[in-house]
C-alpha cells in the first residue's frame, strides 16, 4: 500500500532566503519519520506569475500551462507543510498567490506550518494563514514549528541546525498530520467533494 504524499512548500522566493535550508531540514525529519512519501516544492522554482487565469479556480478550467502544472502538483499531495516567513505581521505574497491559484485541489487535506522570523517566530503569519486555508476546506494542524530569531540556527555552511525543542515540535506536527490525513482522506472522494462544492 502506498504512503500518502506530504508536500513541503517553501513559501519564500527572495534571494538570500532562509526558508530553503529550514525546509530541507524539515524534509529530512519527514523522510526519517517515514509515514509519508515526501516532496519538496519550492515556489521559487515553480515561479508562478501573479494570478492570471480568466476563470475562477473553483471551476478548474485552467488555461495557462503554469496553472495546469501547479494544479497537477497540488492534486498529487495528501498533506502539506508550509515553510514560510512573516512579513509585516502576515505571510508573504508569493505564498498567497500560490494558494489562490487553486481551490478544490487543496480541499479536505491537512496542513502544518513551519514559520520563522524574529521574536514572534512567524506566529502572526500563521494566524493570518489559518482563515485562508479554512476557506479552502483545509484542516490546519494545531501542532506547529515556530522558529524565533531564525538566523541563530543557520550555520556557516548555510544549513539549518535546530535545537531539541524544534525537533520535538516537528515530530509532534508530523504525528498530527498523519492522524488528520486518515480522517480527511475519505472526504476527498469525488462524490463527497461534489456535495461540498
Image (spheres, rainbow, N blue to C red):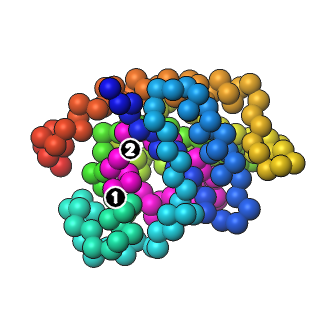
Q: Which residues are magenta?
A: 72-99
Name the residue: 40% across, 47% down: 133
Query: Against 113, is 10 above or below?
Result: below
Taking the image as drawn, is residue 190 in sight? yes
Q: Give the SS element for disc 2.
A: loop
Q: Nearer the viewer, residue 165 or 182?
A: 182
In-image side of 83 versus 197 (left or right): right
User: Which quadrant is home to the N terminus?
Assistant: top left
Residue 174's spot in the image, x, y percent?
A: 52, 28
How far is disc 1 from disc 2 in space, using C-alphas?
Answer: 10 Å
Q: Give the SS element for disc 1.
A: helix
Looking at the rendered structure, which numbered label has been put on residue 99?
A: none
Residue 103's spot in the image, x, y percent?
A: 30, 55
Q: Quadrant of residue 167?
A: top right
Query: Against 114, is 48 above or below?
Result: below
Residues marked 1 and 2 touching at CB (< 8 Å): no
Circle 1 crowding by C-alpha within 10 Å: few under 14, some 14–19, many from 20: many
Q: Is residue 57 magenta?
A: no
Name the residue: 57% across, 52% down: 10
Query: Against 187, is 150 above or below?
Result: below
Q: Which residue is mark 2?
A: 77
Q: Which residue is mark 1?
A: 71
Name the residue: 70% across, 58% down: 17
Amino acid at each position: 500500500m502506498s504512503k500518502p504524499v506530504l508536500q513541503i512548500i517553501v513559501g519564500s522566493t527572495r534571494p538570500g532566503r532562509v526558508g530553503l535550508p529550514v525546509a530541507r531540514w524539515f524534509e529530512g525529519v519527514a523522510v526519517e519519520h517515514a509515514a509519508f512519501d515526501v516532496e519538496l516544492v519550492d515556489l521559487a522554482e515553480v515561479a508562478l506569475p501573479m494570478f492570471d487565469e480568466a476563470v475562477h479556480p473553483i471551476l478548474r478550467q485552467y488555461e495557462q500551462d503554469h496553472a495546469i502544472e501547479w494544479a497537477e502538483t497540488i492534486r498529487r499531495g495528501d498533506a502539506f507543510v508550509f515553510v514560510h516567513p512573516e512579513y509585516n505581521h502576515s505571510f508573504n505574497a508569493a505564498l498567497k498567490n500560490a494558494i489562490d491559484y487553486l481551490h478544490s485541489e487543496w480541499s479536505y487535506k491537512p496542513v502544518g506550518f513551519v514559520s520563522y522570523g524574529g521574536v514572534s517566530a512567524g506566529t502572526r503569519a500563521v494566524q493570518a494563514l489559518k482563515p485562508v486555508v479554512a476557506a479552502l476546506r483545509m484542516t490546519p494542524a494545531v501542532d506547529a514549528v515556530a522558529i524565533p530569531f531564525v538566523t541563530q540556527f543557520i550555520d556557516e555552511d548555510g544549513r539549518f541546525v535546530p535545537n531539541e525543542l524544534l525537533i520535538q515540535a516537528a515530530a509532534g506536527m508530523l504525528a498530527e498530520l498523519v492522524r488528520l490525513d486518515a480522517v480527511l482522506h475519505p472526504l476527498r472522494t469525488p462524490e463527497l467533494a461534489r456535495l461540498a462544492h
